[in-house]
Image: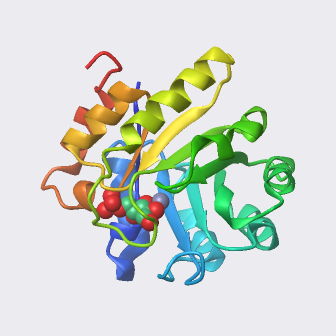
């Protein structure tokens, strides 16, 4: 079944704990937490302090998306704050392998993300060390942007490679995911949908999540 990971970036920032509990009640699988540093991306959002504060509020797995330079420096803090999965960007460090090792040695699942303009060749050497690939379908930095169509081919190509190699890796997509683009991404090969504005914007989030979870590869 498809997993849904709503982005806390679209929750009411003055009541993040309540937003998190709402996701859980609505049947979300993971909580996607967007960490931005104002350097790798133009915006600044949540840090480890907030992840730690949210940890006792919910049992839901925390899917932490690091959009920060020098991720190795901060991974230990995000581990101790209670992250279940930590995804870093391949563009942010020369030491991808080391960063992934630190994440896994710390007991979390390791993910690697790539921007819409970054070729998939950049992540292929690390596939054996990954639990998750996060395909960005917008330029990271802000919620509410439009899905970039060319990312569908990228998803299909990553899915083919992962299946050919027989790897057990979750493939997630993030950015501009709606009912329509989400369905097409699942058909192209993702099994996790990360989304902010379209999920927090609907009247009945539980109904919407249920619908997305029912998408299937064959359409
Ligand atoms: C973008 C973030 C996304 C974002 C998704 O930089 O990584 O997770 O919050 O928001 P929507 O679904 O509104 O594009
Ligand atoms: Zn994200």
Q: Which is nearer the eye, 33 or 137? A: 137
Residue at point 65%, 41% (across, down): 121
Task: Name the spot of residue 55 as percent of width and height, x first.
Answer: 59, 64
Does residue 191 appear in this view?
no
How far across and down, in percent of the image, does residue 195 sit? 35, 53
Which quadrant of the structure image shows residue 75? bottom right
Position above or below: 132 against 25: above
* Tally of marks: 0
Q: Position of residue 7 (x, y in %)?
A: 40, 60
Where 64 falls versus 105 (above or below)? below
Q: Is residue 32 left or right of residue 40?
A: left
Residue pictured at 79% horizontal, 51% vertical? 100
Q: Is residue 50 above or below residue 138?
A: below
- Name which residue lies at 75% across and 61% down: 79
- Image quadrant in which the C terminus is located: top left
Q: Which of the 4 image quarters holds residue 132?
A: top right
Indicate the position of residue 15 as horizontal and vertical percent values: 37, 77
Quadrant in which ligand 1 is drawn: bottom left
Evaluate whether residue 71 shows in this view.
yes
On the picture, is 94 further left or further right than 14? Answer: right
What residue is drawn where x is 36% and y is 65%?
A: 19
Colour mode of the rendering: rainbow
Q: Nearer the viewer, residue 155 or 129?
A: 155
Nearer to us in this view, 19 or 71: 71
Vertical placement of residue 115 versus 123, above or below: below
Left or right: 175 with respect to 66? left
> Is residue 154 left or right of 103 when viewed as pictured?
left
* Direction left: furthest residue: 203
């Amino acid at each position: 079944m498809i997993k849904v990971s709503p982005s806390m970036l679209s929750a009411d920032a003055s009541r993040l704990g309540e937003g998190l509990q709402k996701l859980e009640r609505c049947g979300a699988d993971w909580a996607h937490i967007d960490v931005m540093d104002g350097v790798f991306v133009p915006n600044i959002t949540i840090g480890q302090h907030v992840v730690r504060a949210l940890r006792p509020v919910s049992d839901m797995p925390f899917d932490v998306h690091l959009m920060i330079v020098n991720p190795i420096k901060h991974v230990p803090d995000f581990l101790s704050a209670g992250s279940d999965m930590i995804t870093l960007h391949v563009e942010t460090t020369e030491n991808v392998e080391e960063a992934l090792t630190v994440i896994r040695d710390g007991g979390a699942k390791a993910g690697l993300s790539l921007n819409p303009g970054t070729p998939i060749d950049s992540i292929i050497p690390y596939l054996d060390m990954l639990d998750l690939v996060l395909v960005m379908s917008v330029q990271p930095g802000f919620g509410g942007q439009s899905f970039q169509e060319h990312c569908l081919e990228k998803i299909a190509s990553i899915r083919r490679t992962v299946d050919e190699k027989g790897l057990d890796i979750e493939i997630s997509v993030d950015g501009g995911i709606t009912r329509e683009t989400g369905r097409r991404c699942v058909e192209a090969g993702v099994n996790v949908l990360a989304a902010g504005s379209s999920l927090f914007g609907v009247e009945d989030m539980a109904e919407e999540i249920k619908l997305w979870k029912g998408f299937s590869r064959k359409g």
